[in-house]
Amino acid sequence: MSIRALWACFLAGFRRWSAYRAATAAGAFTNTMFGLTKASITVAAIGAAGGTLAGYDVRAGATYAWLTQALLGPVYVFHWDELAQRVRTGDIAVDFARPVDLQLSWLAADLGRAAVTVLPRGIPPIVVGALTFGLTGPDEVDAYVLGALSIVLAVSISFLCRFAVNLCAFWLIEIRGALTLYMVVSGVLCGLIIPVHWFPSWLKALANATPFPSTLQTPVDILSGRVTGVEAVGVFVVQIGWLVATLVLGRLVLARGTHRLVVQGG
Amino acid sequence: MADAYRALLGARLRAQTSYRASFALDLLANVGIGLLEFCEIYVIFHNIDVLGGLDWQEALLVFALSNIAFSLADLGFGHLDELPRYLRAGTLDAMLLRPLPLLGQLVTSDISLRRLGRTAIALVVLAYALPTAVADWTPAKLLLVLVTPIAGAAVFAALFVCAAALQFWLVDGGEVANAFTYGGSYVSQYPSSVLHVLLRSFFTFVVPASFVAYLPTLVLLDRSPPTGLPAALGWCAPLAAMAMSVVAAAWWRQGIRHYTGAGG
């Protein structure tokens, strides 16, 4: 399979999502409104702890809150059942007939979606956050490059997890409950609502045993300058590990599911 | 007309519970939502003792009242979120032809029993927090505990209707409304004293989220709001619900009047 085919999938995802301008603007508005509340609660908690909480001072806490709001759209922490619906209706058979790898072509399309939404959904919360609370970031340019790469990995891992969960539709007829459960568990463990660093040790251990912190907390940590230098490279390597793991997991589930698939019709 | 609704509702409820495994999983997922919302408060209070003037038990009271109210509203009205889908697909036109009010049809179209899973968690938290947080009980306080979640549910239900009405104009941009429905729910779980005065005023007097849990909780605790508002506002959740309902009804009528069909 050629890189050109995947590039075409990436562009298709990019173009498809660029059509929904109103939806993108609405998403940015909503993320920003939530950001105001989230940053207030985060800052209040840090204030109540005496000015620093698990290494976050007020400015670092606000930066965490606003960066997560900026990234949750591109990373896509929401309900997603497009692939599951294709399994349910049998349309997945069409996808199997295509001369591109199913998993990688969908991944490429999702990266296209993230690429077109990252700036319009990310810049408004960051600007509002900087104006209302004040933000902080790393000093070196390298950290921003690593942060950008980390966002790409985060989007990929998030997609690969959703891909695997959606494929449960091969076994379950009604998959909404499973998807909801996935959304809430990943939502907490990725550090969307409260930083993973604030978790009690048992919950932190649980979170770190999953790929979820790599989908949000890691890029936020790098871009906010919470982790720098060797430590930043370390969390980045962990992300690469989860990328490989979720890629393999998705392929295994796909292979097992394909064996079960019987599509109606001739 | 009541018969028609009874038949519709009965059919929906039977339909949901007939696939037992799916329903059980759905219910479990919603218990999960309740638990994870709880986790949020738990993690915060794992690190600190007081947030916005409330300690752990007192904050749980706010959490529980807010979650009971929101989950009940979500049960009856949350699926109004689906309106843009009907608008795009043109299926709304079929509903407009039937001899029942559109809103009534939409509400009864997908009453979601699974959302009781979240209510259950909130009730457990309320049962734990009430005896420890509230010191001296009076009949008035008991009345407040009973009325507040119902009024709060009405506030969120009205917000859902407002949000749905907005879809007639926005369609693709419908997510804007989430800032006020789900955003209001998020704010109402916390003591609003942590918010900046502008944001706090917005989520008290425009979107009445503070009336749902925080202000009533202060009455239960015999405290005045640290923000200088009169304590009596804690009794005003029903008034907020009524005001919000009037706005929602007017807005909804405007929305339907604006709707011109999907064409064809």
Image (spheres, coloured by chain):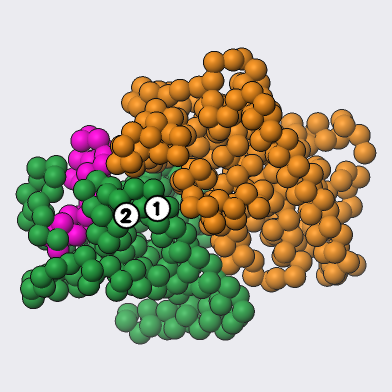
Chain colours: A orange, B green
Residue type at mark 1: give it. His
Residue at 80 percent of width and 33 percent of height: A8
Is residue A125 shown left or right of residue B195? Answer: right
Q: Residue at x 13, y 45 (%)?
A: B226
On the image, the x and y values in percent for residue B33 come to 48, 62
Marks 2 and 1, how far apart in space?
17 Å
Q: Is residue A104 left or right of residue A115?
A: right
The number of callouts visible is 2
Residue at screen point 71% across, 39% down: A238
Circles 2 and 1, Cβ within 8 Å, touching? The answer is: no
| SS assignment at label 1 | helix
Q: Which mark is on residue B46?
A: 1
- B256 or B143: nearer the viewer: B143
**Residue designated by label 2:** B189
Residue A75 drawn at (x, y percent): 60, 40
Q: Name the kind of residue labelled 2 in the image.
A: Gln
**Secondary structure, magenta segment, majority class:** helix
